[in-house]
Image (cartoon, rainbow, N blue to C red):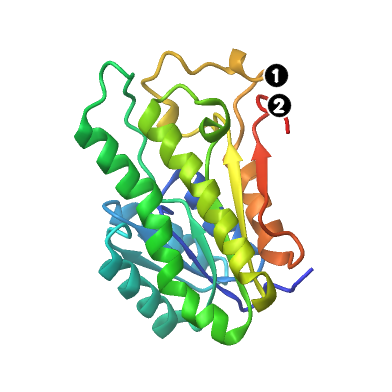
Amino acid sequence: MDNLNGKVALVTGASRGIGRDIALALAAAGCRVAVGYHRDKAGADAVADTICQEGGQAVALGGDVADPQVADRLVRETESRLGPLGIVVNNAGINPVRTSEQITTADWEETLRVNLGSAFHAIQAALPGMRERQWGRIITLSSVAAQLGGVIGPHYAASKAGLIGLTHYYAAALAKEGVTSNAIAPALIETEMLKGNPSITPTLIPVGRFGHTGEVASVVVMLAANGYITGQTINVNGGWYMS
């Protein structure tokens, strides 16, 4: 297992929920963390402040990472303020609930732009430095919706399935260059995103409860430290989908 002390991580969508706990967990493991956010500056600042108060190094960096120019800027700012970027955690995403009868073309396109496009652009921006240094970790948050369809809608399921394909491509392409690429597929983690959808209940989960954000964050830290796991999707789902 690699020592993460001093490694630099960029976590997108890190102002709250799963992303927040991922940023905190990586900092606790010794990483310097760029806390990415789109609109919630106060939330991201609070995460960065917490890390700094506990003796770590962190900065909050804002922008729509689904825009390739913004993704490039976020990587440049991360490296100028914290050092060479080695770990990218793709957590930015949206989940508007739409059935197949309700969904519009705009819903479809925006969900894929944000959920799939943001990961692609963040990876592409970070990749040259990782390849030059022959070390990198790409960790992408997918979902059980990629495997079972889920309860949010076709747009969300397709975007999350696309992330697994993206993960596989980079894992195969970069295996000999010291860069790993893995996905995590959580199911029903207890965050604000669960609210407002009556279809989402703990009875869906075999273990009988929602997951905790820390249970996802601990897997991120494990994948960041492990150089032999690549091309995998780690299921954090309480037994809902078994592979």
Q: Residues within 10 Å of mark 1 (few under 14, many from 20)?
A: few
Decide if residue 227 is on the left or right side of residue 43: right
- Residue in the foreground of this view, choosing between 122 and 147: 147
Residue drawn 50% across and 26% down? Answer: 149
Q: Secondary structure at mark 1?
A: loop
Q: How far is the residue under mark 2 from the one under mark 1?
A: 6 Å
Is residue 174 visible in the rendered image? The answer is yes
Residue drawn 53% across and 37% down? Answer: 143
Residue drawn 38% across and 45% down? Answer: 93
- Residue in the foreground of this view, choosing between 162 and 23: 162
Decide if residue 162 is on the left or right side of residue 117: right
Q: Amino acid at mark 2?
A: Gly
- Residue in the foreground of this view, choosing between 82 and 188: 188
Numbered tag placed on residue 239 in the rendering: 2
Decide if residue 63 is on the left or right side of residue 117: left
| Residue 166 placement (x, y as % from top left) | 51, 54
Which quarter of the rendering shows the N terminus?
A: bottom right
Work out whether 38 lies above or below 177.
Answer: above
| Residue 220 placement (x, y as % from top left) | 63, 54
Q: Check whether the beta carbons of the residues at disc 2 and disc 1 lie within 8 A of each other.
A: yes
Work out whether 75 lies above or below 122.
Answer: below
Q: Amino acid at mark 1?
A: Pro
| Residue 75 placement (x, y as % from top left) | 39, 74
Is residue 141 visible in the rendered image? The answer is no
Residue drawn 32% across and 19% down? Answer: 100
Q: Secondary structure at mark 2?
A: loop
Q: Which residue is mark 1?
A: 206
Q: Of callouts 2 and 1, which one flags the residue occurring earlier in the amino acid sequence?
A: 1
